[in-house]
Structures are given as structure tokens and as C-alpha cells.
Amino acid sequence: MADVLSQSQIDALLSAVRSGEKDLDKADSGQSEKKYRKYDFSSPKKFTKDRIKMLNGIFENYTRVINSRLNGLLRINCEIDVESIEEQKYYEFSNALVEGDVLSLADVMINGKDGGAPILVYLSTSAAMGMMDRMMGGEGTQDINVQSDYTYTDLELRLYESIMQDLVSVMGGSWENYLPVEFVYSRTEVNPTLVQLMPIDEIVIIVDLKLQFPTHSGRMSICLPAVMLTNVFSEINREAPGRKTHEEEKSQEIFEHLRDSSLEIVAELGKTNLTLNDIYHLNVGDVIDLGQPKESPVHLEIGGYRWFTGHIGVYKKNMAVKIDDVCYQAEKRSE
């Protein structure tokens, strides 16, 4: 609790301020101002960190798939990494485009149904030109004379569409751990600045991929509309209980098949060391000293691992082992 000033201390403080001996502005400036993260209430976040993390894992898998495909297509090693995944408004994505840029549109099918909105895929001019140069037999070196507003020729557009169709067609494979999603290449927009593909205030997720080749580099951006992602996440939530039930039924079916299987159980009475000469001269009726009392616990092993402990007894005139304890922990089984 803060100290309470007496009346005399308050009078002394006020007189010091009036006389100029104490400057309140300087006193306040000495205290470090606590910083807070700004939050835009007019545009609240639509997707949680868990959803962004899920998307990051999905596109990490996607980069590995297209990495191997581009290595085979271009006969050159490349490295593809997820640079960032951010929630933005569509105008932030569209404002970064120039007249010469080309966008690819792909329709989304979720469990065979329309996903609600197409996705947009942008491949930087430097990356696209290098890939096309390799496809035409060149070295894939980056032409320094190519400007950012470079306009593709008809032949280059055909090659561009061929590359994008291949990259889009394998995108659904990275979603199969959650639900069946299919991406179908739709069309190419050669001047996206003149076409409003979606409302400018639409919430989107921008996935930026960095492409690094030995001779050139570039980036690939994937714009995922919030409408499509909302449908995907709703379908995942809806199928989650059903998936769990299906897995439980499958595990029960596997257990039913294993129920009638037979396993060898070994009861270990004790351990001792004998020379080969002693073993050679053993006869019926000889006694081997196991080095422990007869009341000592007996270990039962299955598959070379200790699963139970018990003690020796007799059941219906037969030797038997009564189980006293179960070794649930893995470290106890390997002791």
C-alpha cells in the first residue's frame, strides 16, 4: 500500500513546486511509460491463433509437396518456406498489385460442395520468369531488365497457367488430415487492378511463401477468403465428433480380432550364472541355487518385457503364479 503523506509533507511539497525547486514534469518523465498493444475495434480479428497455427501446419505440408514437384519439373533444386500467415483486409492485398501482375483463381470444393468463394494465388514476376526460362531449356537466371510492371506475352501466359494449374491441383492434399478439400484451377486475371474480385473490406488470410532457386528467387502469395475458411472450419468442427466415433469403432474392431490371439507368458523364477562344465554335469534331481528366497516375487514377461509380478502357488494340483501387481509404466517393464 502507498505511503500516506501528512499535512506538513503536503504543504512542503506544494511550496517546493511554487518556488521552482521541484519540477513535476521532469519527475513524471523519469517514469517509464507502459506500452500496450493497439487493437483495432473497428476490424476485430476473425480467426484465433489456433486457426492460424493450423493453417501454418497445412501450408508447411504444402511447401514440401510443391518443392518436390518443382524439383522434378524444372530439374533444379529449390527451397520453399512459409514466410508469414496474416489476417488482413482484401484491399491490403490488392493495393500491393500493379498492372502487370497476374492472378490465378481456383474454386474450392469442401466434401464435394462449393466452398463459397475462390482463392487467389499470386506468383511474383521474377519467380515466374525464372521457372519459364528453365522450362524452355534456359538456366533460369533472373533478367535484371524485367520491370515490376512487365506484361506477359501469350506464350508466357500459357506457360504460367501450366505452372499454376500444377501447383493448385496438389493444394488439397495438405488438407486431407482434416477433411477432403479440392482446389480446381479456374482462370487467370492478367490485370487484377481493373477487376474487383471480392469486396475491399473482406477479411482474408494471406499466406506468403518464399521461393529460393540457385539462380533466382521470388515469392508466392495465397489469398484465402474468410467465407471459404469459415466453411472449412465449420465442417471440421462438425465432423470432429463423427471422426472420433469412427476411430473408436475401428479400434474396437481391431481389438476384437486380437482378442483370440495367443501370447507366450514367461514366468521368471530367478537368475543365476553357471559354467558350461556345471551345466554339462547336471542330472535329474540336482538343485540349482537361484540366490533368492522361495517367497520372492515372480516376474511375468510378455514379448521380452515385464508386465506382471506375482508369487508361486498351486492351483488344482498344478503350479501356478498369482498376479499381485501390474507394471503399467514403461520404465518398470524394461527393468
Image (tube, grey):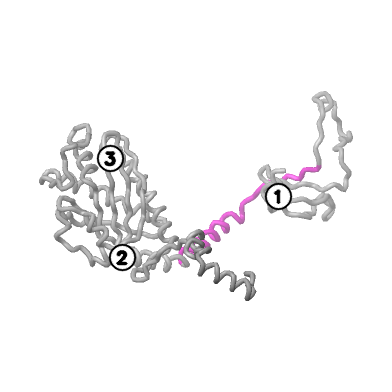
- Tag on residue 203? 2
Q: Is residue 51 visible?
A: yes
Residue 249 shows in this picture: no
Residue placed under numbered mark 3 in the picture: 217
Does residue 179 lie above or below 6 as drawn?
above
Q: For the view shown, which residue lies furthest in the top direction?
A: 277
**Which region shows up in magenta?**
242-269
Q: What distance separates the C-alpha of mark 3 from that of mark 1?
A: 57 Å
Q: Quadrant of residue 54?
A: bottom left
Locate residue 251, reporting x and y percent: 54, 59
Identify residue type, mark 2.
Ile
Instruction: Residue at 74%, 47% (x, y): give it.
Output: 300
Residue 249: within the magenta?
yes
Residue 69: quarter of image = top left
Q: Is 26 in front, or is 63?
A: 26
For mark 1, what is the residue?
Answer: 307
Camera-side mark, 1 or 2: 2
At mark 2, the secondary structure is strand
Which element carries disc 1, helix, strand or loop? strand
Residue pictured at 32% horizontal, 35% vertical: 77
The kind of residue tagged 1 is Trp
Neighbor class of circle 2 (other Cα within 10 Å; few <14, some 14-19, many 20+) is many
Decide: is 5 above or below 55. below
